[in-house]
Each structure stands twice: as structure tokens, then as C-alpha cells.
Image: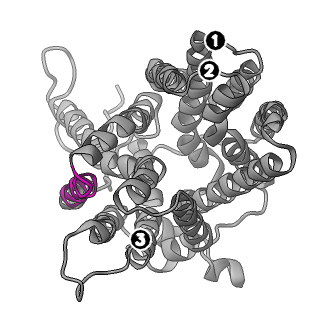
Amino acid sequence: MSTVTGARRRPGTAARLGVPPLRGHGRFITGNLIDSLGNGMLLPLGLLYFTDVRGLPAAQVGMAMTVGQAVALPVTFLAGRLMDRTGPRTVVVAANVLSAVGFTLFLFADRLWHVAVVHVVVQAGINMYFTAQRTLITYVTEPGERRAWFAFTGSLRNVGLAAGSAAAAGALVVFGKGSLWWLIAVDAATYLLAALCFATLRTTPPGSPATAVVSVVPVVPEPDGTPADERATRVDHTRRYLLLVAVNLPYVLAQAALSVLVALYTTRALGLPASAASVLFVVNTVIVSGCSTVITAHVAPKAPRRAVAAGYLVMAAGMGAFMLPAMPAPPALAVTAWGALVAAIALFSVAEILLGPALSELSVSLTPDAAGGFTQGLYQFSWALGMVAAPALFTLLLEAGPLLPWGAEAVACLIAAAAAPALRTPTRHRRRKSR
């Protein structure tokens, strides 16, 4: 059942805005908001802290950060194994505590190898959190409301990131770069507060649809004792989940482009001021924060695979709009850079709203064990790997030509849109006959 059609009917403004029922979820909402606030406060300023406060060379700090984040990649699978043993709540709590420890270590890091170590710890916490967070949603919400919750938490995350970034920017303006030390200390405390909110949640494992229907098809065992139809089903589930991971990668790269590529493109290729990227980021944040639940509830296709296909078509159009200002054209046909960029970021934002909740819903429902530790670790690995690879990939393409990164991403989006219809969630799952 789709998230939208299966949701409980709620009269009033909340239903019209597509907001899921919030009563009884105060600590879950608060934990998500505080976690996002902490990310927004410091993650964009980590490089500034180590260069301007600690006096380390920028290029070497950037390399140390990349090394640390790359070393933390396998944590997604370790977090998945831990989630299978202890449940998602424990992993989310541990992730926030680990992030608090990592940011506390920032206060004592004054060498390059320290920078790498603290980013291993911080990125490990981030990878753990997002490995378990989607499954945690299935433990605290109703099945028919999950896409609405994915949309709502995505909107909440954008609000938290924007508020954290604004608070950090205000502190820098008023108190100068010396305030970074205090921002780090406050940030570590916010992660501990988020951990407390998640630790006190009451969770209920969702019922397994795999036990709902008994197969009446004769079962023929293989030599190793595994029924032939069950083995074939498992292979099909694995293939479809790997397809989901592949389909998710263009979305990951698009998210990375917002923070990595836009600033370089607008300043180097288009000659705009450095503030252009910040303005576009604000436009994106406003659209996603204000429109996610409404579009998800009333505009997005009900089937998540169709929402993914539609989202990638809109994203491809957005990539094309980003290309327009750098295209050679006669003066009469030339478009203003700002007009094209605003249109591009608007399309990008709508695509993000269509893609984010639908991909998250598929990540926990595409197969009977989709919400399990290994599959969630694999899905989050695609995020972590894409974020690590994006800076090198986009800068390399941009150096070769200003149109190449946008064109390559547009092609990837079109391929993903073509593959999305194959991401059909199962309606019946067989179980082995009891013996």
C-alpha cells in the first residue's frame, strides 16, 4: 500500500499540507531537528576551523578530511550488523554519541593526522545515523504513513540545517572566528541531547509481510536444502535491491553537486559573486522545507517507483537549466545567468522532493528484508561513497568543460528514470511451510 493512499485520514490543515499525524512523536521529531541543527552549525565550518583557528594549510586539511571520510565508509555495514542485533534505536543513539565525541575531539586536534582521525569518528557517526534512521521510522510510524514521514523528516532536516547555519553565521559575524571553538562545544552538546531524545523512544518492530501469506506452490528442495522457488526469490530480491542502490547514485551525486559544484560553476564559469551559491542554497532550502509534505501528499505519483521516475525527469531538466548560462548562443537567444539558475534550482528542489521520500520508502519496502541491517548498510554505502567521490568527479569534469558535469548528471538521471519502473515492491511473499 502506498504511503499516501494508506495514510489515516486527518481533517484540517495538517491533512491539506500532507503532514503525518504528529501526536505521540514529540521526542522523535525533536531528536531529528536537533541532529540536523548540529549538522548545520558546524559541518560547513570544519575546514575554516582547522585553517583559521588551528593554522593548518587548507589543501592538506582538505586531503586529511577526505581520507578520514573514506576510512569511515565500511561503518555502514558494521552499523547494519549492529542494527540487526540491537534494533535501529540503539544504533541511532550510538551514532549521536559518537558524533558528540568526534566534535569534542575537534577541540584538541592541532595536527593533520588529528584532522583525519576526528573526521573518521564524525563520519562514522553520520554513517551510523543514516544507516538506521530510515528503519527507525518504520519502528515508530504506521506503514501507510511512511512516505509522508520521510517527506516530513526531510523537510525538518532542511529547517534544522538552515537554522544551524544561520546561528553559526550570526556567531561569526558578531564574535568573529574565535567563536568557532564555542560553536564546536555547543554542537557536541546538541548531539548528546539528540541521543537522549532517541534513547527514550518507544519502538515497535513492524509486522513482517513475509509471514502474511502461505504459499500453495509445491516446494522442491535444492541439494543444500533450500527450496528452489525460495532461492530464486532471494536472487530476484537481491537483484532488485542492487538496482535500487544503482538508481540512488544519481540522486546522491545531485545532492553533492549542490554543495560542491554550484559554487565553483557560478564563480569560475559564469563570473558571478561568491554569494550566488549561498542564495541558491537558500532558495532550495525554502522550497524543500515548505513544499515537501504538500507535493508528496497531493502531487507525487502514489507508487514510489513512478515518483522516482518523475523525479529524475525533472532533475534532468534542472541539469539542463544549469547548463543554459554557459552555452554559446546568439545575443538574441541568450538567457540571463540568474534567471536560468533560479529556474534550475527550482526544478532541482521539486525533483529532490519527488525523489527523496520515494527512494527512502523503497529502501525499506522494496524487498521483505529491505529494512534489515545489511540492505540498509548497502543503501547507505551508496550515499557515503557518492559523497566521497563527488568532489573529485565534479571538479575533474568542470576542468574539462563547464557543461560536462551537468550533462553527465542529466544523462545519469535519464538512465535512472528508465530503470525506475523495475523497482516494483512485492505484494505477496512466500514463506516456507512449517515442518
- Quadrant (top left, top right, bottom left, bottom right) of the N terminus: bottom left
- Residue 50: image x %, image y %? 65, 26
Tag of residue 341:
3
Tell whether label 2 touches label 1 (CB within 8 Å).
yes
Can residue 205 be seen by looking at this rendering?
A: yes
Q: Residue 80: where, in percent of width, then height?
A: 49, 26
Q: Residues within 10 Å of mark 1 (few under 14, many from 20)?
A: some
Q: Nearer the viewer, residue 432 or 137?
A: 137
Image location (x, y in percent) of residue 335: 32, 81
Mark 2 burial class by Cα count in 10 Å: few <14, some 14-19, many 20+: some
Name the side, left or right, on which 90 lies relative to 193. left
Q: Amino acid at mark 2?
A: Leu
Q: Amino acid at mark 3?
A: Leu
| Residue that numbered label 2 is attached to | 56
Residue at position x 52%, y 65% in the image: 280
Image position of 416 (left or right of 15): left
Q: Name the magenta segment's main secondary structure.
A: helix
Q: Nearer the viewer, residue 286 or 392?
A: 392
Q: Nearer the viewer, mark 3 or mark 2?
A: 2
Residue placed under numbered mark 1 in the picture = 111
Split into 4 quadrants, where in the image is the C terminus?
Answer: top left
Q: Mark 3 vs mark 1: which is more N-terminal?
A: 1
Residue span colored magenta: 401-415
Report the amino acid beneath label 1. Arg
Q: CA distance from mark 1 to mark 2?
A: 7 Å
Instruction: Indicate which disc, 3 or 2, sits on the residue closer to the N terminus.
Output: 2
User: Could you tell which of marks 1 and 2 lies nearer the N-terminus?
Assistant: 2
- Residue 412 magenta-highlighted: yes
**Secondary structure of the residue carrying numbered label 1:** loop
Answer whether residue 389 is magenta in the image. Answer: no
